[in-house]
């Protein structure tokens, strides 16, 4: 039985995911709720979703390196 995942805190969701890691339906549902709470403004694009992954990832890394200087 999947509990009301939307009412859980992030810590509770992580525990739930850990406890139900071998139950695909429960794991996926909890992970989806947790992922939906992520701030999309702070996320980096997934390399395989990019048109030219190699050069775009390189540009992202160079940008990060230049910020630290």
Image (spheres, rainbow, N blue to C red):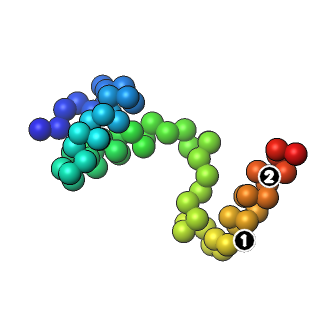
**Residue 30 at x, y = what percent?**
30, 41
- 7 up-or-down from 31: above or below: above
Instruction: Determine which of the numbered discs, if any, sits on residue 23 in the image.
Output: none
Q: Residues within 10 Å of mark 1 (few under 14, many from 20)?
A: few
Asked which quadrant contains residue 9, the reply is top left
Which corner quadrant holds the C terminus? Answer: top right
Residue tagged 1? 55
Element marked by disc 1: helix
Marks 2 and 1 in Cβ contact (< 8 Å) = no
- How far is disc 2 from disc 1 in space, using C-alphas? 15 Å
Q: Earlier in the sequence, mark 2 or mark 1?
A: 1
**Is residue 25 something one can see in this rendering?**
no
- 5 up-or-down from 60: above or below: above
Q: Is residue 24 left or right of residue 46?
A: left
Residue tagged 2? 65
Which corner quadrant holds the N terminus? Answer: top left
Q: Residues within 10 Å of mark 2 (few under 14, many from 20)?
A: few
**Is residue 39 something one can see in this rendering?**
yes
Residue positioned 76% across, 51% down in the render: 64
Element marked by disc 2: helix
**Residue 51 at x, y = what percent?**
63, 72
Asked which quadrant contains residue 61, the reply is bottom right
Q: Nearer the viewer, mark 2 or mark 1?
A: 2
């Amino acid at each position: 039985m999947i509990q009301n995942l939307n009412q859980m805190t992030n810590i509770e969701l992580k525990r739930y995911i850990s406890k139900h890691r071998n139950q695909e339906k429960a794991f996926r549902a909890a992970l989806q709720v947790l992922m939906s709470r992520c701030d999309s403004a702070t996320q980096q694009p997934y390399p395989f979703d990019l048109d030219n992954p190699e050069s775009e990832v390189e540009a992202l890394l160079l940008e990060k390196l230049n910020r630290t200087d």
